[in-house]
Image (cartoon, rainbow, N blue to C red):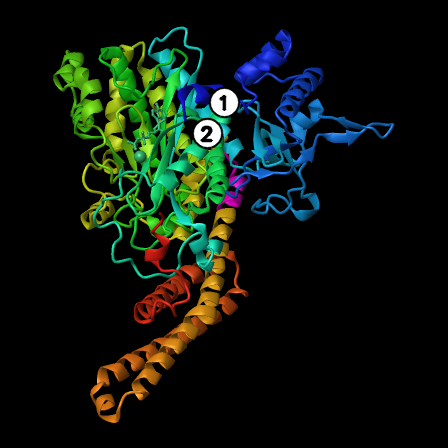
Amino acid sequence: MEFDKAREIFGMYVFDRRAMKERLPQHIFEALMASIEGGQKLDSAMADMVAAAMKEWALSKGATHWTHWFHPRTEMTAEKHMSFMSKDESGMPIESFKGKELIQSEPDASSLPSGGIRSTFEARGYSAWDPSSPAFIMMSKKGGTLCIPSVFISYDGTPLDLKTPLLKAVDAVETRSMRLLKLFGNRGIKWAHVTVGAEQEYFLVDSAVAKNRLDIRYCGRTILGCPPPKGQQMEDHYFGSIPARVLSFMEDVERDLYRLGVVITTRHNEVAPCQFEFAPQFADANLACDQNQQIMDVMRKMARRHDFQLLLHEKPFAGLNGSGKHVNFSIMDSEGRNLLKPSSNHRKNIQFLTFLSALLLGVSKFHSLLRAAIASPGNMHRLGGNEAPPAIMSAYLGSTLTGILEAVEKGLPDDMPAQALIDLGMNKLPSVMADNSDRNRTAPLAFTGNKFEFRAPGAPQSIAGPLTMMLAAWAWGLETVGDMIESRVGEVDALDAALEAIKFAAAESRAFRFEGNAYSPQWHEEAKKRGLTIVNSTPEALALFLLPENRELLSKLHIMTDREVIAYYEIRLEQYIKTVEIEMGVLRTMIWEGILPALSKQILLESSALSALPEDARKEACSWSACIGRLGSLKTSLISASEKLEALREKMHALDTEERAAAITEEGLPLYAQIRQICDTAESLVAGDIWPYPTYTKLLSIS
Ligand code: ADP
Ligand code: MG
């Protein structure tokens, strides 16, 4: 798109600061800004005026409806559209939208998961306007809907969404960062904001092909399929030239996102065939979370318009790379300084090391929480797949930074700590980091020069969950480090006190830091020796939420109460069970409707070809008979394996949630793998025109 055109449409569907200033009386605008920045409440008269301006703005853009747009614990967003239209007393149509509707709404959201927090008789949930993320219009073919970003809570105020804990975790980090900044003697800094940029990986397949695959339609991934002869072996797709049809999709996505004020800075091919990536310009955490949801939504809708099916699943194709969401994060102060950026100024560099150490301290102590945060039914297939982050959490810093932390840990000379750090290359850090950081892409958490990148979240996940847990750990680290420094100032200089805290954090986080190849089997052994948490299945990983130290962390920081943590765990476990159960049902249908009949057809075909042979030739064609025999025994084993699957499905009805999760994991998944192997062998033996489902080769070729 031409630059001028992009500039013209940029943010046109966002009720941003510019639109507010244009449409609100000065004093209301200022009150609203104060409420966004300082959390002051807007009174109802003011809310009415904001609502009126928002309504006029939305109508002028063609919107017909409004909705509170919130993030229930489903990883997606929810919306209940309300019409602006109503009738006045004389029966005449008027457009109405009141301040109280802007501030609070009451969607009858009783079907959204609450993990038992809402009993059905008090099923109502309330959504409340979150003014820190601007309202926007989601345009549709015949109009548009004004979306008001909101939090979602139960009748007694208990959060039911992913947004409220995120806002609390962001606040926990920001207040503790401000305290550290003060301890370092920074004056005049008004705020520190967590910044986030989430890279989004995805697959595109042709919808005409995908519609013939029940698994893609209902599970978002293939549950069967032989590897294609040419997958990603040649590594010729990554960063290759983008196919014209895909580029056209990307341009349309970007244009719609510009209108929503979201800038996509990077677009490229990813490693697997038909795999691509978008990366947006980073924003404040809360907004970045909303924007990632908008990106996924626009992509989904645009894919349909381009006759593609968008796959956001973590592992749509066995044997090919899966898709993740790399969550990049840092913290920025009101002077625009990135606090995770090394500096050539000595004081600022120790400050940088302190923020970094606080994160390392937190994540090494609470790494099991990070593991729990990224556990999902789909991510189980991706993690540890020799191309994706392993299921063991660790951090990679690069050799320069590791060298510095090791030296600080050993102890710098008391009289000249500053000089010792400079000798270690501390003053050269900014340039060294820019050139050398992030050569190792195997660690789940990596320092990438001026920010951290959490690579383990799955592509369809909301970033809110993983980010909340990451920030909780960081907040704890910042508090611990802050306490250490505060207790020493007076006795020693703040910088020396900080170095002591860094030394402590370096020692405490040693086991969590790993610079080697985290995909290697040796790391597994090594991590075990280091006492790191290693769990492979999703239920085991989710159970880590329930560890007393994790629950205590979240409740002490007021991010989630104990009851909420348990509810969150239950919701995610149920999600796991339901997903696998749906997959089992789809598998069953694909077997009985497609694969068994295909095997019969092939057997019939081979048998009639064999019987058509002259008697002499038939005797010699023993390999033909062997082939028919093989097809027959595949069919027999497939029937027996799918009967076992049926029996398991039956048995599961009588089990409680945790027992079901265990049965699925321990009995279902191995059975599943066995069935897949039979089906994939069958695929390789059955004629292409008899095989009922489009193959990987067909799915993975878009022109
Ligand atoms: P890579 O693929 O090398 O990790 P990309 O350019 O694809 O890098 O993506 C980097 C992401 O990190 C972008 O979304 C970018 O906006 C984000 N990012 C950059 N700086 C920061 C920062 N200070 N805080 C948060 N996110 C950042
Ligand atoms: Mg990337």
Is residue 563 visible in the rendered image? The answer is yes
* Label 2 neighbour load within 10 Å: few <14, some 14-19, many 20+: many
Quadrant of the rendered image containing residue 110: top right
Q: Which is more N-terminal, label 1 or label 2?
A: 1
The majority secondary structure of the magenta stretch comes to helix
Q: Is residue 589 above or below residue 130?
A: below
Residue at 48% of width from left, 62% of height from top? 586
Tag 1: residue type? Ile
Q: Read off the magenta span.
A: 560-569
In the rendering, at what x and y percent does residue 524 appear?
Answer: 23, 48
Query: Is residue 514 toward the left or the right of residue 61 in the image?
Result: left
Per the rendering, the mark at residue 553 is none
Query: Is residue 383 toward the left or the right of residue 297 in the image?
Result: left
Specify whether tag 2 is near ligand 1 (CB below 8 Å): no
Tag 2: residue type? Arg
Q: Which residue is at the far left? A: 423
Q: Spatial distance from mark 2 to mark 1, Cα to Cα? A: 8 Å
Residue at 57% of width from left, 21% of height from top? 15
Helix, strand or loop for disc 2: helix
Quadrant of the rendered image containing residue 616: bottom left
Residue that carries the numbered disc 2 in the rendered image:
255
Residue at 40% of width from left, 44% of height from top? 372
* Label 1 neighbour load within 10 Å: few <14, some 14-19, many 20+: some
CB contact under 8 Å: marks 2 and 1: yes
Residue that carries the numbered disc 1 in the rendered image:
9
